[in-house]
Amino acid sequence: MDLRLAIISHQALSTLGGVPIHIRQLAEAMVKLGVDVEVIAPAYSEVADFSSYPFKLTPILVGSRLQTMRTLEYSYKVYKYLLENRRRFDAIHGSQWSMLLPCLKKHEIGLPMITKFHGTFFYGVVNIMIYETRHWLFNEAGEALVLPIYTYIESTCARKSDGIICISKSVKEEVLSLSHYNCGGEMRVIYNGVDLEKFKPFDCDGIHEVYGVNEGDRVVLYVGLLQPRKGVHHLIKVVRSILKEYPKLKVLIAGKGEKRYTNYLHRIAKPKDRFKFLGKVPHGRLPELYNLAEVCVMPSIYEPLGNVALEAMACGKPVLAGNTGGLHEIIKHQENGILLDIEHIESELIKYISLLLGNEQLRNFLGRKAREYVEKRFSWKKTAMLTINFIKEILGELSS
């Protein structure tokens, strides 16, 4: 059967982070498999021309200034849009908070609701409260005020959905816990994919100067949002200790984030010439950065899965990642990467960055095994096919 699918993102496609990349690449893979896809995403100003996408993009303008009010406003506007255009779709596949009103009003819309969870707000806050109390108090304490609202939203979506997709087993357990094991429909774990043609090992001679790196520098890379739960401050703090052994160490930090936390990172980044803050790097340029690096670091204390880990692994690079969330589902310690004890994150970073920089054979072994592992298990085509099949199963169950 042909499938006409509305894919709803709870973040603008221009936003830095894994969710917009996931939505875009999943939609592109589905189109290649013959699905008629329309992506619905929030917009906070007039939207530029996105005619280059192989799918239809429908931006929904959101005017609220506060994040929680934007979330609720957007969910309501998505519900109204789906109600008016329900005959154009066979099913709705939306990401978490955007699905609140569509799930509550699904009897009016009359279409199956499949909600995807990329993580949960509740467990993200709980983890940072436990492991990064100081940074939570000064940077994200406001989350405590809205925690009950997002807990209600996530648990309601889980209970009211006809089907639930989680990007890792870890996220599945979070959703089951939030819903008190009372989810409305079948649950399925479907991992993210990675573009194996774009993210692959290659020679990057001649591009060092583009990123402020000299020939002979030993490059350690961080890619992602700059927020306390990502643990970038731990990476910065340990550099002085490693410099004694590796004086040509250079740390590249690619990403943007919260102003207060970003300013803090710039203050503690010493000596200054050992750090390069690159800001937001276009997704298409990231393969260059991964290949430029000897080691990629993800010192997160909460990470539902980690697109960055998959991309770096696909480029044949060893990844050092916090042993948290879904990361331990894709990284096997000392087999295709390194898992760090998040309770002793700084001593672990010193130990394993030093180990990998000093052992080329081990770096090459872990990088090769990482590429082989990702090639066998993760591609956007596979992710899209599993998602399509799951949605068709839900459609079949509801029609029988």
Image (cartoon, helix red, strand yellow):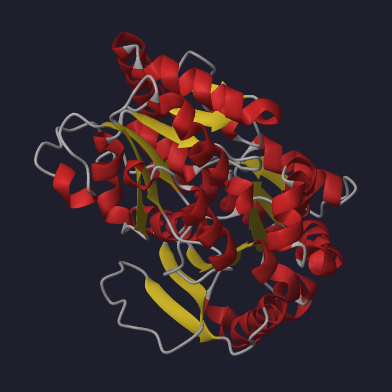
Image height check: is 156 above or below 285? below
Q: Residue furthest left?
A: 206
Which residue occupies the foreground of this view, 75 or 111? 75
Which residue occupies the foreground of this view, 319 or 213? 213
Q: Is residue 75 left or right of residue 363?
A: right
Residue 83 placement (x, y as % from top left): 65, 84
Q: Quadrant of the C terminus?
A: bottom right
Q: Quadrant of residue 154?
A: bottom right
- Residue drawn at 56 percent across, 64 percent down: 258
Q: Is residue 305 left or right of residue 374?
A: right
Which residue occupies the foreground of this view, 117 or 133? 133
Image height check: is 49 above or below 225? below
Which residue occupies the foreground of this view, 248 or 52? 248
Q: Quadrant of residue 105?
A: bottom right
- Residue drawn at 37 percent across, 35 percent down: 312
- Judge whether residue 168 can be spotted in this image: yes
Residue 276 placement (x, y as % from top left): 33, 49
- Judge whether residue 193 can be spotted in this image: no
Q: Is residue 178 left or right of residue 385?
A: right
Q: Is residue 60 left or right of residue 54?
A: right
Image height check: is 376 above or below 165? above
Residue 238 placement (x, y as % from top left): 51, 32
Residue 79 placement (x, y as % from top left): 67, 81
Q: Count of labels shown?
A: 0
